[in-house]
Structures are given as structure tokens and as C-alpha cells.
Amino acid sequence: MKSFRFRLTLIMLILIGVSVLAAGITMGQIFKNSNMKVLEENMGREIDLLRATFPFVNADALSSTDYVSYYSQKAKEIAHLTDSRVTFIRKDGTVVGDSLSDPRKMENHASREEIRQATSEGIGRTIRYSETLQRNMLYVAEPVVSDKGFDGYIRLSMSLKAVEEGMQRGWTAIGIGLVLLFIAAGLMSYRIARSLTSPIEHITGVANRISGLDYDARVGVQRRDEVGQLGEAINRMADSLQNQMKTIRDNEDLLQSVMSNMTGGILMIDARECIALVNRESERMLGVMGKRVTDKPYHELKKHYELTKLIEGSIQSRERLHGEVHLYNPEERLVLLDGVPMYEDEGGYRGMLFLLQDITAIRRLENMRSEFVANVSHELKTPIAAVKGFAETLLGGGVKDEETARSFLQIIYDESERLNRLIGDILELSKIESKRSPLDCSPIHISSFIESLLEKLNNVAAKKRITLHMDIPDELFMEADEDKLQQIFLNLLSNGINYTLDGGKVKIKVITLQRDNDTEKVVFTVSDTGIGIPKKDLPRIFERFYRVDKGRSRNSGGTGLGLSIVKHLVDLHHGTLSVESELGLGTTFTVELPLLQQEE
């Protein structure tokens, strides 16, 4: 354990040392860069000040020697004030004044880095070793153009000796700090390593006692970290039986949760032919309580005779089972039953497992589909048979009278129109039910909208001397799909006209009302004085192909799909549709639609 403690201490020291060293280097670099930045900015401001205040002279006003002496003298004066080296350089790179050296002995400076950079960027900065001063220097140069005739550069340079000395002192302070920190870190690391390894030594001792069959030994470490978890693991080893039982219970709880939340029913019959397991869905399907039937013979399900007989046959044969049974609890359900025998790894029989799936809704949909196909076939067959019969009669030459032939052709035309309407209604209903006909909502002026519908139906109503009325507020607007709204009320108004005797009346009325959640509704009522609908037929009139009076419906050209389409279109608008009727007195359809359609 001592070697582990030593290694842990060393690792922590190395990590701390590397971190502090990296931080020190970074801080030193930041300090150096910051100082350099400040020096460069100060020197740039000094050059800007010289550009504005320096008394430049024209080269033509002085002799060459005086001209250089003038700028050199001024450079020395400025250098004394700024504590930096000052150099005046002409545009071609010729040095005309310097605070430290004789300009006539200095080489051309046009190729110097700070001069090239100042020419291209407006200011030049560089650090390099000065051969003249034998030290590292910071050079800052800016172009200067004076109306006195000076066109060139002013360059300031400063020794980096002060910066380097400051950095040296900084590194010394950092080094001393690192040494002190290493000493403190070493002491702290040793204490930490000791606090970590002491519990491990204790746990090792307890583990050795347990391996020596001393199962009363327990780890007394009260920690919640990994060391504490290790101590708890050692304690659990001494109480393995309790842990195994807990694991079994946890697995049972997990299995029970899965079984309870399954959408299908599970029924398990063990080798004793007793009910071993019933999940929540099975309880609902069979109408039993799992606590009461568990460990009881499966014959306890005797009220489901058909199911019991299938289970009995499957248990006796010990073969897979697939079948359908009817359950009554109390309503009738159609259940798909799948059974499989269960065997242990060694081949021993353990019982049967049954899966129950409620397929009532699926079978109902299948029946509706079959019924729809049958109805469509029947509805298509009638006009096709009429068209074929009259066409064969005409083709056979059996009709010599032109008036009779014309009536036959009219019948053929009417039946083909009816067939076309039927196919159109079927396609429209299919689009609506398959959600392929989304709403295209826009504001609709209800009064103008209904008035246009009544104009379309005026001729049909006039033939039967039926009066059309409307009672609609002039200012009412609503949001809806205009084409689909037109389908709704054309169907309802056409039905009213078709099933109203000559001289009757069809009326459409609109009101608005407030409902819960501040939702405004628009209520349409389409009423007629027609033949009415028997009470027994009212619940089914919105079914596809359902007709109250089949003969009259066909004579009126109906397809049996109009009200079904109306129902679907009203639902699509998030509305409700209802009907009231008295036989012989008339019928009233009520359509309730939201004033504004909500986005989905």
C-alpha cells in the first residue's frame, strides 16, 4: 500500500507542477505581449505628436550639412524628452537625423522592416537586434509629409532591456512561487493519498477476514465515493442471499411492469394446469381479477366457454395454437388467441403461454370495407344494367318509334349521369377519408355565399313549385373552405328539394352564438316541409349508401353518399352535424361550425 500511496502522491505532484508551469508560461507571455503593446501604442502617439508639432524645414533652405545637423540636433532634443532614440528618414530611405549616430555614416533604411511596413500599412513595428547599440530594440515608424517640404518617416526606437529585466524578475518570482507551491502540494498530496489509501487498507483487512469465513465482518467506511461503494460491495458479499432475493424481486417487478403495460393480454397456464400469470389487459378482456384466479385451475374461466375449450385442447396436445374466439364481457369482443408451449433448457414441460389480442375494431373495419365494396358493386350494377338493357334493345332494332327510341336514349343518358355522380361521390369520399383533401380556408360572406347557392337551385325548385327562403345576417363573415362549404349545403338543400312535395318550402337560417373557451360558433339550419325521416332510420342516415326509401332515392338521382360526404366535411371543419325529423312534417339539419378555423 505504501508504494501505491507514493505513486498517487507523485502523480498529483506532476499534474499540479505541469498545470502551474503552463499557467506561469502563459501569464509571462501575456505580460510580455501586454508590455510590448503598450510601448508600441505610446511610441505611436509620440510620433503623431511630433508630426503635428515638429518644426520641419525645407532642404532647399539649408545646406546639406546644416540640414542634417538641424534634424540630428532636434532628434537629440526629442530623445532627451522621450527617453527613446529618434530617427528622421527621407522617402528614399536616407537618414537625415538621428539622436545617437551620425546620419552620414548610417546606411540607407528603405529596406528596413518597419519602413516597408509603414509604407504599406501607415505604421510599422518590428523588434530586432541593433548592431549600433548591441541590444534588442523595438522600432516604430510612421510616414510624415510636411508642407515645409519634408517627405519621409519618423522612427522611434526603444531598448527592450527594461522589458527583459522585468520579465527576468517575473520569471524569478514565478520560479520561487512554483517551488513553494510544490512543497505545499507535496504535503497536501501526501495527506490526500493517505486519506484515500487508509480506507482501502481497512477494506482489504475486512475482505481477508471474510475470506477466512468470518461473515460477521463488516466495513465501517461511511463514505459515498468509490471507496465507500467498494466497502458496500464487501458488505453485500457477506449477505449474498439477501441480495439474490432482492435481485429476484427487482426482476419480478420489472416483468410485472412490462406485463401490466402491454397492449395485448398474457395468460400463462403452468404444468399443473393452473393459471400462473394474468396481466392487466387479460383481466380487462376476460373480466376477472388476477389475484382471484392466480394459482387456480384454468377452468375458473368457465364463463368463456369457447376460450376454455381452445385452451384445453392446446394443453392436451402441447402444440402451438392460433385461432379466434368470441368473448362477452358484457359486450361482444373478437379475440385472436395465440398459444405456445413452454419448455426448460433441459426439455422439461413448463406449461402454455397464451397471447390475447382484441381484433374487434380491426374486424369491424374489414367488415365495413367488405360492405362498402359490396354496396359500391351493387350501386354500380344497377345503372350499368339499365344502360346495357336499353342499349341492347336499341341495337337489336326492336324499337321503331322514334319517340320511344328517344326516351330509351334519355334513360341511358340519365343512368350514365347517375353513374358519373356515383363515381364522383365515391372518389370525393375516398379523398376526404384518406385526409388527402386539406382545408383551404378563406373569409366568406355568408349572405352572398348562400344566395349564390340558392340561385343555382332555383330552376330545380321552380319545377316543383318549391319556395326557397334564407334568413342570414348581412354582416356575417366566417372562415372556411368555400368549395367544401358549398358541397355541404348543396347536398343538404338538394336533399330538401328532392324529398319535399310540390308546393313545399325549403329554408336555410344562420345564427351566431358563444360557446365555452370564448369560441364563437356559426349555426346553420336547413329545414324543409318534406316527407320526413322515420325515427328508426335517423341514427343511420349518415352511413354510406344508406337510404330510407331506396326506390325514391334512385328516382331522385341520389347516390346514397351525399349525407356521408356532408358528415365528413363538417368533421373536417371541426364542426358538428345533427338532424331532427318528423314523418310527414319535414326535416331539419343543423350544422354547427367554428367562426374561425384553428391551425393544426
Image (tube, rainbow, N blue to C red):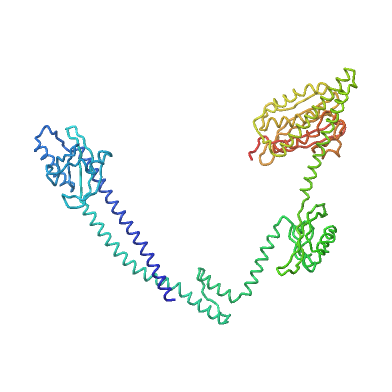
Residue lying furthest front: 396
Query: Which quadrant would the C terminus be assigned to in this image?
Result: top right
- Total marks placed: 0
Task: Name which quarter of the figure residue 375 lies in.
Answer: top right
Query: Which quadrant would the N terminus be assigned to in this image?
Result: bottom left
Q: Considering only vertical position in the picture, is 549 above or below 346?
A: above
Describe residue 448's horizontal placement relative to residue 326 as left or right. left
- Of 535 and 544, nearer the camera is 544
> Residue 93: x, y in percent?
18, 39
- Of 533 and 364, nearer the camera is 364
Residue lying furthest top: 402
Q: Considering only vertical position in the picture, is 475 above or below 131?
A: above
> Residue 373: x, y in percent?
80, 39
> Residue 209: x, y in percent?
54, 81
> Residue 264: x, y in percent?
73, 56
Task: Name which quarter of the figure residue 497 lies in.
Answer: top right
